[in-house]
Structures are given as C-alpha cells and as structure tokens.
Image: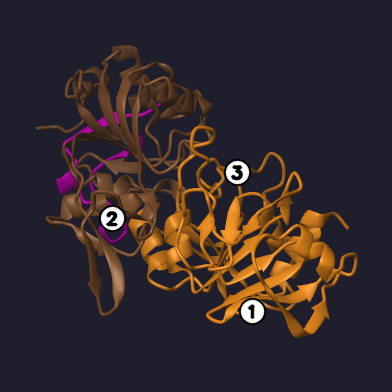
Chain colours: A brown, B orange
Amino acid sequence: MSKVVSLEEALKFVKDGTTVMIPGFMGVGTPETLVDGLVDKKVKDLFLICTDTARPNVGIGKLIASGQIKKLYASHIGTNPETGKMMNAGLIDVTLIPQGTLAERIRAGGAGLGGFLTPTGVGTVVEEGKQKMALDGKEYLLELPLRADVALLRGSKVDKKGNVWYNAATRNFNTHMATAADVVIVEARELLEVGEIDPNNVMTPGIFVDYIVKGE
Amino acid sequence: MDIRERIAKRVAKDLEDGDIVNLGIGMPTLVANYITEGIEVILQSENGFVRMGPAPEEGKEDPDIVNAGGVPVTVLEGAAYFDSATSFGIIRGGHVDATVLGALQVDQEGNLANWMIPGKLVPGMGGAMDLVVGAKKVILAMEHTAKGKPKILRSCTLPLTAKKEVDLIVTEMGVFEITPGGMYLREIASDTTVEKIKEVTEAEFIVDDNLITMED
C-alpha cells in the first residue's frame, strides 16, 4: 500500500476535538501545507501540542487566528499576540511548559517511558501539582509522557517508504513527534524514490510514518 | 557608548576560549559583537544547533536557519544541527558553560524572574527555565532599573524562572557576583558611585574591598 496520499485523505484523521502535535520553531520546520489544509477544513476544538505559536499568519499562528484551537500546550506564545488575547478572553486553555521538558515529554511518550525526573521548574509555578523527589540531595520534578492522536510533520526530503531527512534547524520537534502519535503524517518538501536517501542519513525511520503528502 | 553596548561588552569579557554559550534574545544577543579577539566561543541556539554565526547578508537568508528569536542567522564552519531533546540535553546536562539572559527581577539570593508578569505579560518561559537550571554559569545582562524602579531586589515578587541559579549580574552601573556568602559589588562604572547604586538597588550587597572600575 502506498503511503503517499492526497492532502484531503491525510487530514481525514483530524476531526473536531483531535489532539494534534505540530513541530516547528517560529514556523521553521512546520508543515505549512498541512496547516493550511487544517485551516481550510475548519475542524474545531483541537488540542494542539507545539513549542510556540509563531507569529500571526505564520505556521501554527494561522490555526490560532482561525479560532480552531481549544486547548494548547506550548513553551512560548509571546511572539503571537493573538494567542495571549484569546487566552485572556478564555477562548484557549493554555498550559505553558518549559521547552526542554516539552521535548522530553514527547520523546518519553514515543519511547515507552512512564516519565522522567528533571530539575527544570523546581521552585517555580511549574512544580504545582507535580510529584517532587530528592535524589542525592538534588530536587527533581516527575514529568509524564505526552502523546497525540495525530502528528503533522515536515520533512525536507522524504522517500516513498516514509524515511525522512530534515534540513538545518527544521528538525527541532519533528523527530520526537514522529514517535508519539497514533497517526503520523509527513509533508514532503521533496518527495524521493526509495533508495534516494542513504540509510545513514535517515533521521526519522519510515516505520514511524503512516502517510506522506507532497508539500507545496 | 550606549548603555546596552557597555553591558554587552562587559559580559563578553567573562567568556573564555572554548566556552559553549547560549545568548538570550535582546541585549544578550549583542554580546556576540564583543567577544575577545583570538578566542573561540561556541554559540548554541536552543532550536537546534551549535556554532551559530552572524546575521546573513541581505538577500542571503536561509529560511531553515533562524536563531532562538526566529531571526535568520548563519552557521560557522564546524557547525552541527540536532533535534530539540538533544538540544535541551546539552543545556540541562551541563554542557553549556554560560548562558546570558535578561531579567525582570533578580534578588540577592540569586533567584530570577524573567518569564511573566501575571495579568499583564504571559509570553511563556520558552527555554529559559532549562537554561538557567542547566548552564554552569548564569549571567544576567540587564539595565539596572525599570523606569527608575529597582530590579535588583531583596526577594523577587514575580513568578520565578529558577531558584538560586544566578551567578553574575551586569548592569550599566556595575557588576555583582552572587556567592553563598552574599551578593558582592565587584566592579563599578566610572560614571557612578556606590551611594548612587545603593539608591536604586533594593538588595543588600557587600562592596568588594578591591572594587574595580568597569571599562566604558
């Protein structure tokens, strides 16, 4: 069965209320074609997990502006004033998570780990409601894994088996999110035949990828 | 010299040959312009690379390479890209020698508040909580006051970024070091006096017996 599908076929997995992970740092590494597809599809009440909400009308910022997000986990929303406004108006339920903790929670979610201990956030509001442990005289917070229904990724080069290579700083959360969702869809900036990516250079093995959509 | 440049220049003097350094957004970014000639400081960008270079020439921006503020940058020879969990492993794992950040408030115990003002400004912590906990040395590059009001306090009133992690505070008026024995004024700018610093500093500090004059 071919993994290469149309945008419409791929996005049928995203329905009202779906939990979606989208990578990207200020839009770099975000699958723009898939995001535009979600905006056009008008699915609502999404629970979005991402590191930042970019700028208005860039990457994930478009999904904020369109009012499709009900719940948001992110490390930074300051570069998109819309997110803050909607949070203050009670339209989006925002939970802020330190960026390293967010990356590791997603990694844990895809790696079968029950959680991990981190010193980040000790003595701050981040520790509220979390189990705190002292090991060898140092305090840690127990952070739990994160998973999603669907992950929407962006590969710079993707072969037809779903093996992915990411260019420069676009890798960021892509490799972790690829492992932590029930359905994984990759937008291919460049779609290649199998064998055109050297196995040594594969950053996300194709076994994690369910569907491929050719990007713009 | 502009006070922001004065601060950046002084911070740069604390960086040593071979140091791996993460510079925050804003004034800390200026530090890169004053690194001592002949030494190599490796800049880490938490969105996923080391050996960050200067801004590209106009028209030569690569959309896949931005710094932690989302601004296009270049990478130097010997650079390496990685994913976000690796990036924050580098940060939390003690592989970053120094981080330079701004502050809303800092106190004499070394507590730092720089990520939110409840009810006013909630941008999120991004990578700051991980950086402040993980970097071997935490240097604050900050203006001494905010509209004339002290920012260096006895005890922070804003939500903390991290507890007792700050090592050095560089302002346009002087340089403070936080030690287990208290906060010391180590250097003073040529255009101020200890009395003037006391007027705009709420924290209690000890004046170093060998107080040095800061370079302009």
Helix, strand or loop at label 2? It is helix
User: In the image, which residues are magenta?
Assistant: A189-216
- The disc placed on residue B16 is 1
| Image point (51%, 62%), residue name | B111
Query: In the rendered image, which quarter contains the C terminus of chain A?
Result: top left
Residue B20 vs A97, above or below: the answer is: below
Q: Position of residue B171 (x, y in %)?
A: 73, 62
Going by the numbered disc 1, the residue's amino acid type is Glu
Q: Position of residue A30 (x, y in %)?
A: 40, 36
| Image point (16%, 55%), residue name | A111
Estimate the spatial distance between the alpha carbons at disc 3 and disc 1, rounded to whole Å: 26 Å
Taking depth in this image into account, of A99 and B109 the one nearest to the observer is B109
Going by the numbered disc 2, the residue's amino acid type is Glu
Q: Nearer the viewer, mark 3 or mark 1?
A: 1
> Is residue B37 something one can see in this rendering?
no
- Residue position for label 2: A104
Is B192 placed left or right of B77 in the picture? Answer: right
* Crowdedness near tag 1: few (<14), some (14–19) or many (≥20) residues, C-alpha within 10 Å: some
> Is residue A171 something one can see in this rendering?
yes
**Quadrant of the rendered image containing residue B34:** bottom right
Is B27 placed left or right of B107 in the picture? Answer: right
* Crowdedness near tag 3: few (<14), some (14–19) or many (≥20) residues, C-alpha within 10 Å: few
Is A103 placed left or right of B23 in the picture? Answer: left
Of pointers 3 and 1, the one earlier in the residue sequence: 1
**Quadrant of the rendered image containing residue B177:** bottom right
- Residue position for label 3: B71
| Image point (60%, 50%), residue name | B104
